[in-house]
Image (spheres, rainbow, N blue to C red):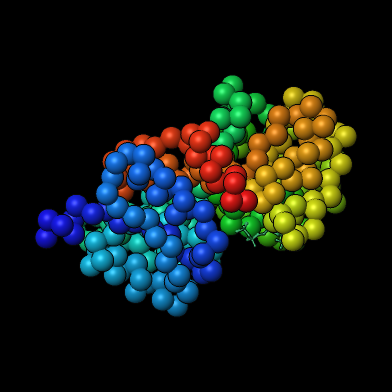
Amino acid sequence: MAIASSFQLAGVMGFPIMHSRSPMIHNYWLAQHGIAGVYTPIAVPRERLEKALRALPALNYRGVNLTIPLKEDALRIADRIDPLARKIGAVNCIVVARDGTLDGYNYDAYGFIQSLREADETWRADAGPVLVLGAGGAARAIVAGLLQEGARQVLIANRTLERAQTLAADMRQEFAGLADIAAIDWREREAAAEGVAALVNTTSMGMKGEPPLKMRLDGLPRHALVADIVYVPLETPLLASARARGHRAVDGLGMLLHQARPAFERWFNVMPQATRDLRKKIEETL
Ligand code: ATR
């Protein structure tokens, strides 16, 4: 059916989903590139994910993004998994192939790395040790992204030490012999910050409604970059104190915008840009 196939569909599945900014981002690009189509939020609880994904070809969807709590489940459902998504252990983008089978990707790592590059084009993953705070899903993508980019030393500090140890062990296995990856006690985070080239918060601390991240930055070298994946608020207490000390500070909105770009390209064959105008539009909704 010519009409059905010329109208392009994609979306984001999650539960809850109506808070997602992804529809704004992708619909902005669809309009910008003159593509007739729509990107929809789709509320899907975990128990319905498999049926929902398998319905995509019949619904004529090009694919979907996945968010909380579906990223790990999607890894088990997709027919083919990209190597980096496999290393991360989660899928945030599904592409429907011509034959109706499903390819799984994870662009969170790409989004994070691009957001650092946008803030500092000379940034290199191998510039020195990186201290990552947190060991949840976001930390997995970020640690994998840093290692993929050539980081030589990654320190992971998490409230629950065991989770940091599991993440470190998994990444040592996935990136065998390429880097020194260590879990450290949460109480050691300030001491560990001495000598790092970058500090990254991947926890929910500092997010609106959550407690602030308590961390003294006294030991952080002046040249160190400080990144936070939180984007509500855009300027977290961590980033404000980093900026006050003269550090380059990277907020979480860049990661959100940049992870969306390669997904859009897979579905619609155009690599869109995270323009200032788009960023401003999203900022207005925060
Ligand atoms: P995501 O997928 O977004 O990373 P997650 O898997 O729930 O979410 O991980 C949340 C991260 O924030 C974890 O590292 C968590 O620490 P624990 O592993 O100890 O739970 C961290 N976190 C959340 N609230 C925190 C708090 N009040 N203090 C310290 N760490 C916190």
- Percent position (x, y) of residue 81? 37, 54
| Residue at x 71%, y 54% (from the top left corner) | 207
Count the marks: how many? 0
Residue 113 in view here: no
Q: Quadrant of ligand 1?
A: bottom right
| Residue at x 26%, y 66% (from the top left corner) | 59
Residue 24 in view here: yes
Up-down relation of residue 114 to residue 264 (above or below): above
Residue 266 sits in quarter: top left
- Percent position (x, y) of residue 212? 80, 53
The residue lying toward the viewer, choosing from 255 and 163, is 255
> If the image is split into quadrants, where does the N terminus sit?
bottom left
Q: Looking at the image, which residue sits at the far top?
A: 122
In this picture, residue 124 sits left or right of residue 269: right
In this picture, residue 134 sits left or right of residue 21: right
| Residue at x 52%, y 58% (from the top left corner) | 20
Q: Looking at the image, which residue sits at the far left?
A: 1
In this picture, residue 173 sits left or right of residue 204: left
